[in-house]
Image (cartoon, rainbow, N blue to C red):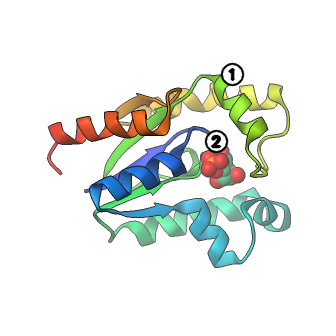
Amino acid sequence: MKLWLIGFMGSGKSTIGGLLASKLGYSFIDTDLIISQECGLSVEKIFARYGAPHFRTLEAQLIARLRAKSSCVIATGGGMPIYNKLGEGLVCYLCVDFEVLYMRLLQDGTPRPLFKDKTTLYQLYTERTPIYAHLAQHTFSANQTPPQVVAEILALLRQVEL
Ligand code: S3P
């Protein structure tokens, strides 16, 4: 089984994904981290130096490489499922209220090239949230703490065949 976690920036995909993978004994894959390590640059610097389309190409190439993987939890970058088709697997959307996300992003030290101000962030949020919901087989409220979300995902997985 391959589990994709999708959702907006700041929805907790990496934290929840890491916890979930260790509970399941699966490997954990953080797509932003892999791309950043392979380029030797932060995501912010990749955007600044090579542009957003180049980053999206790197994401598409990574998805292709992940096709062969199984028994893994994949935390995607917020734009990955918007610009690219994900491969096989169970897609879970971590849904968070805008104000909660906004506060998290303000407090989070990670520079995000697409987080410029509240108005444009909200615009992106309203564009993307219906797409995430449409792409996912399951949606989880991630306004709650990561362990609570992990518990809900594990409960779902007990019902579907692993
Ligand atoms: C992006 C989200 C970021 C990162 C890049 C672009 C997006 O990942 O991939 O800055 O388009 O929403 P997080 O969702 O982990 O912040």
Left or right of 69 in this view: 35:
right
| Badge 1 amino acid | Glu
The numbered mark at residue 141 is: none
Relative to 156, residue 112 above or below: below
Residue 161 x, y percent position in the rendering: 14, 47
Residue 146 x, y percent position in the rendering: 48, 39
Query: At 53% across and 26% down in the image, what residue appears?
Result: 143
Left or right of 34 in this view: 140:
left
Relative to 57, residue 124 above or below: above
Instruction: Give residue 108's quadrant in the image.
Output: top right
Q: Is mark 2 within 8 Å of ligand 1?
A: yes
Residue 124 x, y percent position in the rendering: 70, 32
Image marks 1 and 2: residues in contact by CB distance under 8 Å? no
Please say whether residue 88 is visible from this viewpoint.
no
- Give the residue at mark 2: 9
Task: Tell me the quadrant of the picture where the N terminus can be found.
Answer: bottom left
Left or right of 87 in this view: 80:
right
Query: At 41% across and 68% down in the image, what residue appears?
Result: 66
Please say whether residue 111 is visible from this viewpoint.
yes
| Badge 2 amino acid | Met
Query: At 78% across and 41% down in the image, what residue appears?
Result: 115
Q: Secondary structure at mark 1?
A: helix
Tally of marks? 2
Residue 34 x, y percent position in the rendering: 57, 69
- Give the residue at mark 1: 99
